[in-house]
Amino acid sequence: MIMKASPTSGEQPMYHSPAVFAPFSQLIAAESTRHGGVSPMPYTSLNLGISTADAPENVSENRSRFWQAMRVDPRQVATSHQIHGSQVLPVTQPGHYEGYDALITNRAGIVLAVTIADCTPVLIFDPVHRAVAAIHAGWRGTVQNIVVKTLDRMQQDFGTLPNECYAYIGTCIDECSFEVDYDVAEQFSDAYRRFEPATGKYLVNLKKANLDQLSARGMASSRIQVSPFSTVLHNQDFFSYRHEGGQTGRMLACIGIV
């Protein structure tokens, strides 16, 4: 699927809007790129990560630019300090929380956002019950079935049925770049890992693993969009923690009902 990009004047886009959500005018959904900010190397340039060593004033200006481009008041945003776990937080008011890697809400006017730099962002929209989710699915969260747990919590709290939902699996590290040792690979089934004899390492496919979690809960493939981009292969447009040796910026993936 084609992704709508932010309007620019010959410049690289500041964010992409998933086309799967395009029919829903009441929805705000996007993932940022690394373009359009003020941060110097190695955070060039739209670093939105508050936990990096970038100057706080740079991150503040970058966030201001991003939310302004999204036409979102920063006071509407809910985020969390992510711990690579699988805890799901039902959000009733904006703010910054601790210890959650998935945020859900059915409150209009709240925009959920997760921070990304290789891990998989997953955005979910339930148009029937008007509920949304923003998920940070690192490899640990993926192994812990964070997507399944999020859908289950949405069903419990909002009455969400997965077959009525739409989802976007965002830009993350690609399979050919996510090289791991056996201690990580053994936690994935053969469907999501393959051994590379030349390196003695395994390659893990996070996008497919999270896609299959959505499908296993009954979401139709026609309602799921998977980003064609990679944080590593398209590093000129996205931050990659691994590819850049840990010294890099962060993107945001966000979703909310206006």
Image: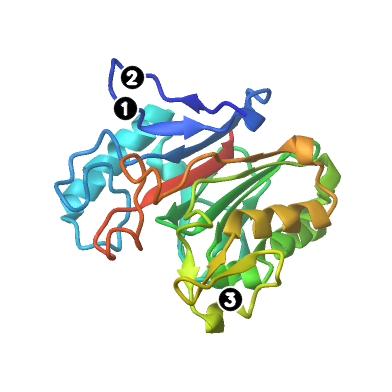
Callout 3: helix, strand or loop? helix
Q: Nearer the viewer, residue 118 or 100?
A: 118
Amino acid type indicated by mark 3: Ala
**Where does label 1 land, which residue?**
12
Density class for disc 2 (Cα within 10 Å; few <14, some 14-19, many ≥20) is: few
For the residues marked 2 and 1, what is the alpha-carbon distance in whole angstroms? 7 Å
**Figure colour scheme:** rainbow
Amino acid of disc 2: Thr
Q: Position of residue 71 (x, y in %)?
A: 42, 28
Residue at 79% x, 52% y is: 215
Report the amino acid beneath label 1. Answer: Gln
Note whether 201 is above or below 78 in the view shown: below
Q: Is residue 58 left or right of residue 110?
A: left
- Seen in the picture, residue 245 relative to 21 is either above or below; the reply is below
- Give the spatial CA distance, label 2 vs label 3: 41 Å
Q: Label 3: which residue?
A: 185
Badge 2 or badge 3: first in the primary sequence = 2
155 lies left or right of 65 = right
Q: Quadrant of residue 100?
A: bottom right
Which residue does the numbered mark 2 point to in the structure image?
Answer: 8
Few, some or many C-alpha atoms within 10 Å of disc 1 (few <14, some 14-19, many ≥20)? some
Q: Are marks 2 and 1 in contact (CB under 8 Å)?
A: yes
Mark 3 surroundings: few (<14), some (14-19) or many (≥20) residues within 10 A: many
Q: Earlier in the sequence, mark 1 or mark 3?
A: 1
| x and y percentages locating residue 186 in the rendered image | 62, 80
Q: Position of residue 88 (x, y in %)?
A: 63, 65
Q: Which quadrant, please, contains the N terminus?
A: top right
Q: What is the quadrant of the C terminus in the image?
A: top right
